[in-house]
Image (cartoon, rainbow, N blue to C red):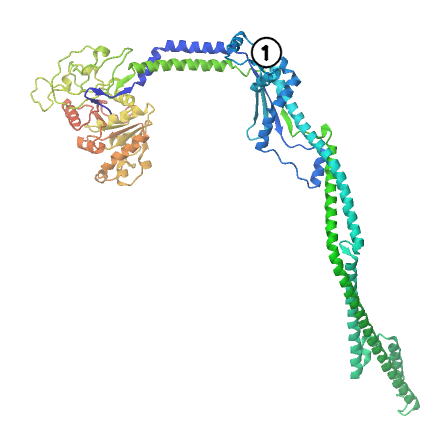
Amino acid sequence: MSGVHGSQQDVDIDLGGLFGAIWRNRMRVLLATVACAGIAFAGANLITPKYKSEARLLIETREPAFTTGTDRSQGREQPPAFDELGIASQVQLLKSADLIKQVTRNMKLQEIEEFDPTAQPSAISDLLVLFGLKKNPLDLAPEDRVLKEFAEKLVVYQVEKSRVIAIEFSSKDPNLAARIPNEMAKVYLSLQSGAKLDTNSEATRWLEPEIANLREKVREAEQKVAEYRSKSDLLPTGENSTFAVRQLTDISTELARVRGERANAEARAESVRNVLTAGGAPDTLTDVVGSQMIQRLKESEAQIQGQISDLSTSLLEGHPRLKGLRSQLVGIRGQIKAETQKILSSLENEAKTARLRETQLVQQLNTVKADTARAGEDEVGLKALEREATAQRQLLETYLARYREATSRTDSGSTPADARIISAAVEPTEVSFPKILPITIVGAVAGFALSAIVILLAELFSGRALKPVGVVAYRREEEIEEIEPEIVVEEPVVKPEPVVHAEPAVRNEQVVRTEPVARPDYGPVRDVRAPAKSLLSSIAPDEDEVEPETVQASLLDTPGLADDGDFSVASVAWHMIENNVSVAISVSPSGDRGSTATVMLARRIAEEHRKTLLIDLTGSACPTRLMAQSTHVPGITDLLVGDAAFGDIIHGDRLSSAHIIPRGNANIKRAMRGIDRLAMVIDSLAGAYDTVIVECGPADVEGVRRLTRGRETDIILSIPGAEEDEIVDLISAFGEAGYSEIVLMTGEGAEPPRYPGRRAA
């Protein structure tokens, strides 16, 4: 808090005085508000109303329905969708002069006075043109004047995060405001469709001679391919094959087959020869068994052996019949052997024939290889000619397809524009400008604000809205000067009350003034009876006393305190709220009675919707018993010894919205070792609460000094029922310790009830 230093004193802005000045001049403010509102209302009615309408276009790629399927089947890519730059380009196209001129001609806007107001200039305009202060508007062509006026009424913009373009137009005529955006949309679509028609027509005209030229080139290329084939004897025999290659393939295949037959014949002949040489049975060979002659001889041999076997049972070995049969058997076996030799000879001849055929095929193969190598060299040139002919043919087919497509799109209905109307403009029914009611309200608010600002500035510059810091002064309409502090002497009373200074010009009290008497300085005492406060610099002693170093005079001997002094809980609460006291140290010399009054103070402040916290530093834990649910909950001592955190020690009051930090359950001596940290705790809590009250009980000055670290802090002396000498001693002690802001609180005189209510602890 700022105090008085010599003749200079810090000042602050009295917000209450500022708002009071506005209230005192409320009739002027009201007249200014009504006047501005009336002017705004009249001006809004004088302005010619304007109507606004809007049409919307969706920009998208559109293709004829009969070409969509064909393009997809041929694998042709679809045109890409419009991006942000494409949409912005379409917006500029809608704003282009050519499109606006087309709309102007279609709707004959040059004949409407609204679009050519300069065609009939006023007398003031003629004078300005005459003196060269203004350019003659008639120098411009009528079409340019209409174009300029049209552009001022037109707004074209892209709807955010979409491919939609809005065409907005304002006009005095609501019908015209709706027709122009629709006409612009139609002209835009027509221009887009016409641009596509022009593109297709130009493509058709360009493709016709190109196709004729390509046809001639394809014919010449194919003729060159045919002539080269006949010249180089590269007659085609199939796909990607020539006669020489086909012949080489056939001879190679035949040679492989002949070589296989030769090897087979040689193997069969070798097997027959080995059997005959070894004297084995030739009937085990496949070639021998397969011979019909051998089969018949084998049958005859089997019959003769059967006859010999039958006759051997009835005839002797020397019988002529048996001898004849055995002779036939030997002859048949000789025939079989001779026949086997013939088979061997036939196999050898077959193998020899295969060798001769192989030799001939090898010779033919060598000849064909030479011819194929020559044909390969000639085929290089042939392929080059074929590639050229193929490329020309493909290009011709592409041009023919494009020509057919372009020809099919030369009709106006076959090329839709890349946009469509999704919202046509309709004739507006409400005026877009001016809005009479909003303009009137804005005018009234502006009048109120301007008048209030003028009054506030007048109060600030005159100094009536400034007040000294640390001194609460009573004010009326006129400025009140500070008066010298004087002692008010009245009849003594029983209740101890602090010295109070009254201002006769304001309070109009019946007082008895005495001349100031030099006396020791015990520090100023706050008077909390009213919104104003007086900072007393001294206390006058009783004249009967002669001790100069102690206070012999009783405050109760000062007349008037019993009638005017008000140091109740309500007055102290009002004083702390009005002065926005954030931290206050409450000392209760009377013990629990003073602590009870402090609890009542915290609850009274909380009722004014201020966040209030009471910290219990008493030894009896009286505030904890009155406010907390239990005396065994964690509190400030638990925090100081480290057994609890901030969130664990803050509890709600049982009977109000205030909060309390109880005394706690930890050892008090151990907790008081960390009292130096308590100041930091209080500073932290002051940032979270509007008001923090520290109830110290019957603490001494030294303990309070350690708690506040010598900083200037509000001291509340809760002294219900205290003796006046005790009050003087306390004020003297705290004044000598440097505490200049001391508030007395008498509280309630009775003992605290057993079951207190909301307003009593």
In the displayed structure, does residue 458 sit left or right of residue 558? right
Please state if 321 lies on the left or on the right of 106 as rendered.
Answer: right
Judging by the rendered image, the residue that carries numbered circle 1 is: 119
Locate residue 327: give its quadrant: bottom right
**Along the line of sight, which residue is nearer the eye, 53 or 593?**
53
- The residue under the point 66% across, 39% down is 77
Q: Position of residue 621 (x, y in %)?
A: 24, 33
How far across and down, in percent of the image, does residue 399 sit?
73, 39
Whether 382 is drawn above or below 718: the answer is: below
> In what quadrant of the picture does the C terminus appear?
top left
For residue 360, say whether it is visible: yes
State whether residue 52 appears in this view.
Answer: no
Which one is in front, 198 or 339? 198
Question: Is 708 or 465 nearer to us in this picture?
Answer: 465
Query: Left of 740 or right of it: where is 159?
Result: right
Q: Farthest residue toward the right?
A: 320
Q: How many marks?
A: 1
Q: Residue at point 15% right, 27% down?
A: 736
Q: Residue furthest top?
A: 123
Most extreme residue toward the left is: 546
